[in-house]
Amino acid sequence: MDHALTLDGVTKRFGSFTAVSDLSLQVPKGCIYGFLGQNGAGKTTTIRMVMSIFHPDQGRISVLGHPDASEVKDRLGYLPEEKGLYKKMKTAEIVAYFGKLKGMDRSTANHKARELLTRFGLGDWLDKKCEAMSKGMGQKVQVLGTIIHDPELVILDEPFSGLDPVNRDTMRDIILDMKRQGRTVIFSTHGMEQAEQLCDYVMMIHKSRLEFAGTLTEIKQGRDLGIQLDYDGDGRALKDLPGAARVNDNGKHAEIFLRPDADPQQALRWLLEQVTVKRFDYREPSLHEVFIRTVAEADQRLLAAAGGR
Amino acid sequence: MANKTLLVAQREYLDNVRTKTFWLGILAFPAIFVVALGIGWVMQKTKQTQSYTVADFTESKIGGEIERAARASTLADFLRAELDKIPKDSEYYRDPQVVAVREHPELLEQGLQAMPEAMRAQLQARLQDAKAKYRYRSPDELGVAGLEREQMMAALNQRVRDGELFAYFVFDKDPVASLDGLAYVSENQTDNELGNWYSRVATRIIQQQRIQQANIPAATARHIREEVDFRPTKPGAGAEIETVTKEEKANKFAPVAFVYLLWIAVFTAAQMLLTNTVEEKSNRIIEVLLSSVSPGELMSGKIWGIGLTGLTIVGSWVVFGVIGVWLAPKLVPSFAELNLLAIVGDPLYIASFLGYFLTGYLLFAAMLVAIGSVCNSLKEAQNLLQPVFLLLMLPLFAMIPIVQEPNGLMARVFTYIPIYTPFAMMNRASGPPPAVEYVVTTALILVSLFVAFKAAGRIFRVGVLMTGNPPKLKEILSWLREK
């Protein structure tokens, strides 16, 4: 058995609204898996079903080889999108409390909580109340509460949202650290760079349906190559590039896709005349581009299906 | 109880009990009680002396006589209160001398002269206290003596308006003949104590004079005026009847106090539970917890933890209550006959109270935790709560009628409405209800609790993760049907 998580034809409806539709997915053990999708696409519902907080209307879910996550709750770690702490509890107490809820004995949990908090730079906060902490610190405490019991599978819903760069790096280190220890990490995110840098696998849900799933290489395979351009100068000129099909201009960086008949060499020569080129790459599209295109294609498909009815 | 439920309960309990506000709240209860009693006492002590005079326009000048009797009656009233302590069925009560003293205040004056000095001083001090309530100011002192009626009335009205006099009494015609010409003149229409007190004295004097005019012997008059008083008793063995003691009477009314305390306790704890659930939901911590515990474990952990908090509050109040009950007879000797400690320690009352607190709380807790779970803010919860509060108020209104007729129809009807069963059974404890009713109601409560918890669990499970508008009743009903 080498899958930490398997979903098989899972569907969840709330009244007439279908939140997740016929979702099948395998998450191999020991990997970092990214869940992508727009707000309201069905990521959180999927995660909640995995955690047995919701029960699917159809399909099967197997978590660490068990059909019901509640049987293996103590081997899972979960950080929901809506994160909160008991404001009046002390930092070390609350982390230990989460550990105890996962079946750790009192003294181990207390000791581990203090050790973890100290290791992650919150040594001065052990006996201070949660209400006094900043958002970033609070989030750190929540993550430590999620992993205190050394879970085999960790699911983090939007772990990076609202964090400053330093705390983002800490979060990234925690995730990588867990992978190194052989644990499986699933996280959902809107940050395509993080997904691209961290994930072994990604999947994307759009309007309750799975659009793609696989390794980054698999997902990008067969898609149009694009120009990755770092530049200085007036970016307005870029959209006049002869042969350009699509331009994602970010001001200092642009991703440009050419029509099949256009030549990237000629494009480079043209660009050199318009702006100061700092870097020029011709390669597979970014995850960001894959995401945007998938949304556009899926919407078109849905529109056509609705029109054809 | 499952291990995780226990952990949740423990956390809830410690979270509440560790705060300063919790203990301040507990202390506030006896403090408010003492302050309320204290205010009454201070008000009584600081009440201004009410000065009055008498405008007597009668030929017989009976007003003056009434006034003298009124002043003497303070002493008479005082001694009469002491005389009342003589048990009514004792032979002394029928003692002609005792009766004479009750009827003839002048005898008291004579008796007073014969008293030992120390005793008289003590009595005088207490009389002084009583006299401080009303002060008579003679027309001479007010400078209105000898004036014509019109001028005197005008002058006295002016004094009343100026606040120099609290009130004055007018005797236009001889009241022995007819009561037409009497008036009480005051600007204060709410405080009638002076008027009532003076009327009582006037009644006595006028009755005496009328009796004299009718040539009725004093003994006959006394006999006629005797007040009818049935001795409260209850059936004893055979043909016997037994006197009902004050203790027994207090005992029969005791459930009212227990129901009231029960009501406050249930209400306080259930309210805490609701606030806590709504706060936790808006705190966004529920989902983290649900990844470790099931919704059922979370809900029961909360209910038990806060129930225990409520029990701590009630327990502290009981401690204060027992201290109060123990102190009361020392401060006010007449409380001793009520034997309150025995009532508070009555095993049936104590067991009923604990049992019915637990079941009553659990029943309302199930309701409030379900309400709390579908609300996003306290404001929303408050709106939903109003009907529940109305439901919860009813046992308070029914308290006195039920204690008067503990096995009556109303008491029985209330008993078999599950949410009122704990209150009604506590209320009826002085009856006490037949054993079979205890068995049936216990079964009823347990079944209701089971149903309430099942329903609350289903609502809680879905509601607690919902955000946005509170669900409609139809939606909630559909959750109840879900497995």
Image: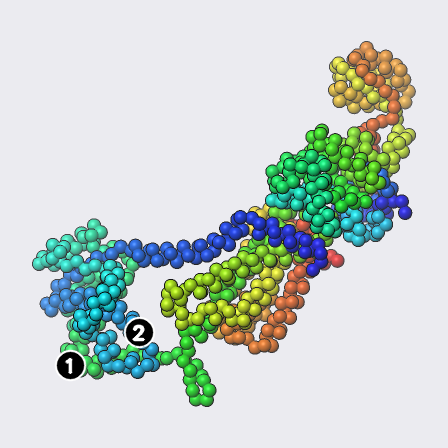
Q: Is residue B125 visible?
A: yes
Give the residue drawn at x 17%, y 58%: B137
Residue receiving disc 1: B215
Q: Are marks 2 and 1 in contact (CB under 8 Å)?
A: no
Residue B79's x, y, as percent? 26, 70
Q: Quadrant of the N terminus of chain B?
A: bottom right
Side of A213 where B132 appears, left or right = left
Label 2 SS = loop
Q: Is residue B419 above or below residue A130?
A: below
* Side (left or right) of B433 relative to A268: left
Residue B181 image offset from top left, x and y in percent = 18, 65
Q: Secondary structure at mark 1?
A: loop
Residue at 69% over, 46% down: A110
**Badge number at residue B84:** 2
| Residue under the point 60% across and 58% down | B307
Among the 4 quarters of the image, the one containing residue A254: top right
Q: Label 2 is placed on what type of residue?
A: Asp
Q: Is residue A202 above or below residue B210?
A: above
Q: Nearer the viewer, residue B247 or B384?
A: B247
